[in-house]
Image: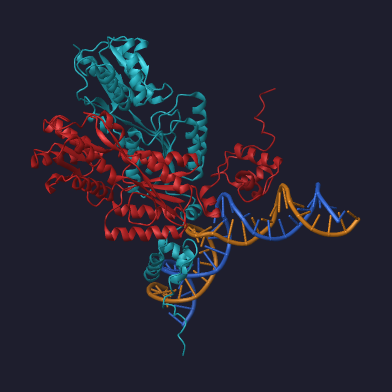
Chain colours: A cyan, B red, C blue, D orange
Amino acid sequence: MSAPTPIPTPDAPLPRPTGPVTLQQVAERAGVSSATASRALHGSSGTRIVGEELRRRVLDAARELRYVSNAPAQALARSTTSVVGVVVHDVADPYFAAIAAGAMGVAREHGLLVMLAATFRDPELELDYLARLRAQRARAVVLAGSGFADRDFTRRLAAEVDAYRADGGHVVAVGEHGIASDTVRPANRSGAALAVRHLHDLGHRDFGIVSGPRALTTVRDRLDGARRQLRSLGVPLPPAQVIDGGFTREQARVAARTLLTRAPDLTAIVVLNDVMAAGVLAALRDDLGLRVPDQVSVVGFDDLPFAADLNPPLTTVRLPLADIGARAMDMILTGPTIEPRTLDLDTELILRNSTMPPR
Amino acid sequence: MSAPTPIPTPDAPLPRPTGPVTLQQVAERAGVSSATASRALHGSSGTRIVGEELRRRVLDAARELRYVSNAPAQALARSTTSVVGVVVHDVADPYFAAIAAGAMGVAREHGLLVMLAATFRDPELELDYLARLRAQRARAVVLAGSGFADRDFTRRLAAEVDAYRADGGHVVAVGEHGIASDTVRPANRSGAALAVRHLHDLGHRDFGIVSGPRALTTVRDRLDGARRQLRSLGVPLPPAQVIDGGFTREQARVAARTLLTRAPDLTAIVVLNDVMAAGVLAALRDDLGLRVPDQVSVVGFDDLPFAADLNPPLTTVRLPLADIGARAMDMILTGPTIEPRTLDLDTELILRNSTMPPR
DNA sequence: TCCCGATGGGAAAGCGCTTTCCCGTAAGCT
DNA sequence: AGCTTACGGGAAAGCGCTTTCCCATCGGGA
């Protein structure tokens, strides 16, 4: 007798099929219908329970074939997914990185996958991404970037959000976006007021503010908080002493230089975020030769991780960034409610070494 | 005459249908078949062109209904998606944030959506996410976290990667992962050597190293590079002068303290990444009262954005982080090749003020 | 003994797209 | 004219799941 043709292993050899393994193949290998296989693997449909024996066979077959279900197909059939979108301005910005990390942490705990979209500060892209996330049937999206204070943009955003919502989507916003939605709201106003009050308590009366693009609601809120506090304290703030630092280190650095040439006598600067504060500190120290806090006090905003490592360590208003992300994700998990919810997250002044009484 | 009731627009009122708008509905509104609607909206299928008139009608209908196609359905039909996965250890870590940002930049330019997964340094999760990304039919994934030097883990990773690849997926790794795949490889070894050589050129002969978890291939490579260079320079490195800084600021801070008590005479420290360097600087300055660089020189690794703002500004080995991410994404776009490709990205020593000749 | 209600499995109908055919019409040849 | 090509549109067959029905089986109560 010649050598027999290769004998199939008892339970059928592992096929090396073309393309991904399908549920059907798993079912065949387990000797059951695809309905049973589906129920055994994802037993979600009501009370239907698969018998112990079959269940085991299916699970084994799935493992042997390294089966993972086709998520798009599943999404189509179930008409729901387990992906959520998070849109930020820029992941490389530690502010957004921290929020995203917070959100991703709780997403993971609940088996959600996150699609992260970075708009690089282009409002148009925000709209775009929202539409694409809607197309993806993302279960929810958190709008983590700052809102834009632009009439037309807000209208279009609202329209897109409405469309998304009509499709069953849920959006939660971080900060004001001019849309009615669940929102977690960092205390930008009172935080800025805190910074001002601290400086005022120290005895400062001549303030400068390094702000950001006015179009951002975050900037508006912080600026407004600082202004109000100043006013209620009876301290004047000449327009020339508020300058736009562009929300980046470099722009803030040059802004600080012009600010100081415009108002060489100011003794206190509140900078509307820590990234810019780093630039301001650099300008003061390296460009202007001014000592902080001896000659000028500065306080930042956000309390990013590097704030403590700046020179000098930065006194700043802490925002619970990871919490912001985490709470936003929580709101997603508890699903949309009849009335939009608002969660206010408080700030805290972190005292370090960039402030002291004026001479 | 009383005010007329709102007149329905001529072409049928916009329905407020339950659930998302489907292609079918768009087709009906445009008075064409769904085939034509599909072609008009996503004309990808070969040469089939839709007539001008119909095309316009379809586009209009789609816009009016705010239609976006159901991505999962599309994925199922086309059996391909436009999502790519990026898995990192932790987005809040500026190192990963920068890589992710680089990747997302080019992803955006090409209309790719990115699913970002953070393993929080749990290898198990890496495997998990890889499987889920496979389930999502992500077109490709970039493994941006450091590899783990663990026999068993690597085997399992390879198996998962193979499965993913068999399904048509493409994986590109950043750094060594022990798998045969496209990889972009930061020059960790030569970068560390660079740091050592710089310090040696300055005249330092007594080195300390603040390392990280040995299980990470990134750590191994950097450590190895430093060690080799030291050896070839004939400089001894007692085991006690290599300490694990845990890859975090806080752990590195305490590590630096013990390092200095073990070896009070060392004059140069190379720290295997910048976030640890921040901790080391803090320890030296605030805990130990040692002046940098006067008494101890330190050089970091990565050149994270905050490195220039540390006290003192940190001399460090720059890794082109955004490029790493961008190039990895490029490799995804050019698709898998027969032979795995390797792209080496070079480092550069950035001189700042944390190093000087020993006294 | 007969009937009835659980129980668990399978057949098959979608989910919303894409794409292959198939077809009618309008050109472009000889 | 007669015939071949394009050309552009539509019908319908999937893509890989989930879920609704339907059905066979079995245990128990009257």
Count of numbered tags: 0
Q: Tell me residue B55's x, y (percent).
A: 67, 41
Does residue A346 appear to the left or right of B237 in the view shown? Answer: right
Q: Tell me residue B282's x, y (percent).
A: 17, 33
Residue nearer the viewer, B288 or A56: B288
On screen, A106 above or below D2?
above
Q: Tell me residue A5's x, y (percent).
A: 47, 82
Q: Is residue A194 visible?
A: no
Taking the spot 30% from the left edge, 35% from the top edge, the residue there is B304
Taking the spot 21% from the left edge, 18% from the top edge, the residue there is A293
Q: Is residue A77 visible?
A: yes
Does residue A53 appear to the left or right of A75 in the view shown? Answer: left
On screen, B261 above or below A61?
above
Q: Tell me residue A238's x, y (percent).
A: 35, 9
Residue nearer the viewer, A178 or A132: A132
Residue sitting farthest toward the bottom: A1
Residue nearer the viewer, B16 or B245: B245
> Image quarter for residue A96?
top left
> Image quarter for residue B313?
top left
Does residue A19 appear to the left or right of C26 in the view shown? Answer: left
Q: Quick one: quadrant of the C terminus of chain A? A: top left
Does residue A309 appear to the left or right of B73 in the view shown? Answer: left
Taking the spot 65% from the left edge, 45% from the top edge, the residue there is B27
Taking the spot 45% from the left edge, 72% from the top edge, the residue there is A31
